[in-house]
Image (cartoon, helix red, strand yellow):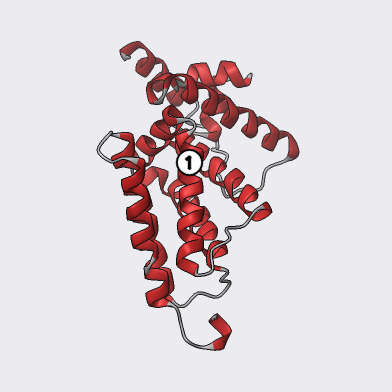
Amino acid sequence: MPAEASRDKATKAAGAGTTRTSPASPLTERQEARRRRILHACAQLACRGGFDAVQMREVAESSQVALGTLYRYFPSKIHLLVATMQDQLEHLHATLRKKPPAGETAAERVAETLMRAFRALQREPQLADAMVRALTFADRSVSPEVDQVSRQTTKIILDAMELTDPAPDQLSAVRVIEHTWHSALITWLSGRASIAQVKVDIETVCRLMDVTAPTSPEHS
C-alpha cells in the first residue's frame, strides 16, 4: 500500500532523533506492559489476516500506543513480526517445561518437541506464515531479533536433549536441526509438503543427536 508506506516513512523520519528501545535493554514494568500489548496486537492482526494485515498504524491503534512510540520499540513490521515469533517460542518453551517430551533418546525427545511446536503453529496458520515470512525477509538490521529467535529455539532443543553443556559437534547438529525445522515450516506453509512429510523430515534430522551423542558418562 503506497499510502501506508508513505505514512510509515514519514513517521520514522519524524522519530529519527529518538532512541530505539533495544530488545537487549532492560525494560521498566510499564515499558514491558506496553511491549506485551504491542506483541499481542500484532499476533491478533496476523491471526486474522496474515502478513499483509499487520500494518504498523493498526498495531499502534490496537495496542493503544502512539505510532512514534511503536517505532521506538520496533522500527519496522519485520522487526515486530520476528519479535512476535520469539514471544510465541517463549510461551511454547514454558509449556514444554511443564510437560517435557517423553522419548527415551535425545532424538526422540527433540523430534517430539519440534512437532509439538509445529502443531502449535499449525493451529494459527496465518500467524505462522506471517512470522516465517518476516524471518525470511529479515536483513541485517533485524539481526538482534533474529538472533533471539535462534537462541530461543536452541534453548528449546537443548532442554529436550536434557543438556546443559553441549559439545561443539552437538551444537552444530542443533543448528542443522533448526535450519531443517525452519525449512519444513516454509515448505508446509507453501503447500509443498504434508504434515506427514514434515514429521518424517524432522525425525530424520533429529537422529543427528544420536550420532553426535558423546559416550562419556557426564553427557549420558
Snapshot quadrant of residue 78: top left
Label 1 residue SS? helix
**How crowded is the residue under tag 1: few (<14 C-alpha within 10 Å), some, or many (20+)?**
few
Q: Please state the total of marks drawn on the protein image.
A: 1
| Residue depicted at 73% across the width and 34% down the height | 30
Q: Is residue 68 left or right of residue 186?
A: right
| Residue depicted at 35% across the width and 11% down the height | 3
Taking the view exactly as shown, the residue that stands out farthest to the left is 192
Compared to residue 35, the image places residue 9 above or below, namely above
Type of amino acid at the residue the image marks with label 1? Arg
| Residue depicted at 43% across the width and 34% down the height | 128
In the foreground, 200 or 208: 200
Compared to residue 48, the image places residue 196 above or below, namely below
Q: Position of residue 214 (x, y in %)?
A: 46, 83
* Residue that mark 1 sits on: 119
Q: The N terminus appears in which quarter of the rendering?
A: top left
Q: The C terminus appears in which quarter of the rendering?
A: bottom right
Taking the view exactly as shown, the residue that stands out farthest to the top is 3
| Residue depicted at 47% across the width and 22% down the height | 56
Residue 14 appears in the rendering:
no
